Amino acid sequence: GNSVTQMEGPVTLSEEAFLTINCTYTATGYPSLFWYVQYPGEGLQLLLKATKADDKGSNKGFEATYRKETTSFHLEKGSVQVSDSAVYFCALSDTPLGGSQGNLIFGKGTKLSVKP
Amino acid sequence: ETGVTQTPRHLVMGMTNKKSLKCEQHLGHNAMYWYKQSAKKPLELMFVYNFKEQTENNSVPSRFSPECPNSSHLFLHLHTLQPEDSALYLCASSAGPSQYYNEQFFGPGTRLTVL
């Protein structure tokens, strides 16, 4: 079945460091891919998305490229800030063509802590 | 109010109590979801409603009872819960099943503690 695997945390970085959070997926059909972020005490917010192969999603300095050949959607940011401390979730939305209803399937989340 | 709202934000209840969680979306969406988020576990999809009809129930115990009176409101009725049901309960909404993608918008969650 469809699944998402993301690197386990926690990840601790210093301010202005480069961030990569790995995400790989298994899916039938043509899924759309998402990164959600959850700040402390809040619900999940959509950070960025990509709906087809080679698309690059970007927002707030974060980027992720939909790589069909490696079934990956790694999240990157060139220079993290303390305010980026949160839990990051990779997710895919399978499609009705795959026999589903297009629900989201989430990874386990990666906690990022950025120190000043 | 904008987006997805949830009330209450925090709830403490005994195992014999009956309580309800409320979710409201102001986005004109047709699909609504309940998720359970426990510490150190993946986000668990509980229920899905499309156009007020329940379309998914992921083997959720009957002590959790959802209700969707219209496309804007979703409730989760709780009774005789167990301590292991303590978690953050998240509500989400989306435009509906889509051939291409299904962007979901989340509420802030209700932090539930069962004593």
Image (spheres, coloured by chain):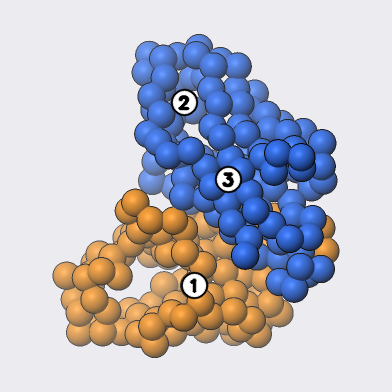
Chain colours: A blue, B orange
- Image quarter hosting the N terminus of chain A: bottom right
Q: Are marks 3 and 2 on the same chain?
A: yes
Residue A79 vertical position relative to residue A28 in the rendered view, above or below: above
Q: Are marks 1 and 3 in contact (CB under 8 Å)?
A: no
Name the residue rendered at 46%, 58% in the picture.
B43
How far apart marks 3 and 2 lie (CA) works out to 19 Å
Is residue A28 in sight in this rendering? yes
Which residue is outermost to the bottom?
A: B62
User: What numbered label is drawn on residue A90?
Assistant: 3
Residue A79: quadrant of the picture: top right
Name the residue rendered at 66%, 38% in the picture.
A73
- The residue at which mark 2 appears reads as A83
| Mark 1 nearby-residue class (10 Å; few <14, some 14–19, many ≥20) | many
Residue B82: quadrant of the picture: bottom left
**First reached walking from the N terminus: tag 3 or tag 2:** 2
**Number of the front mark, 1 or 2:** 1
In the rendered structure, which amino acid carries the disc numbered 1? Met
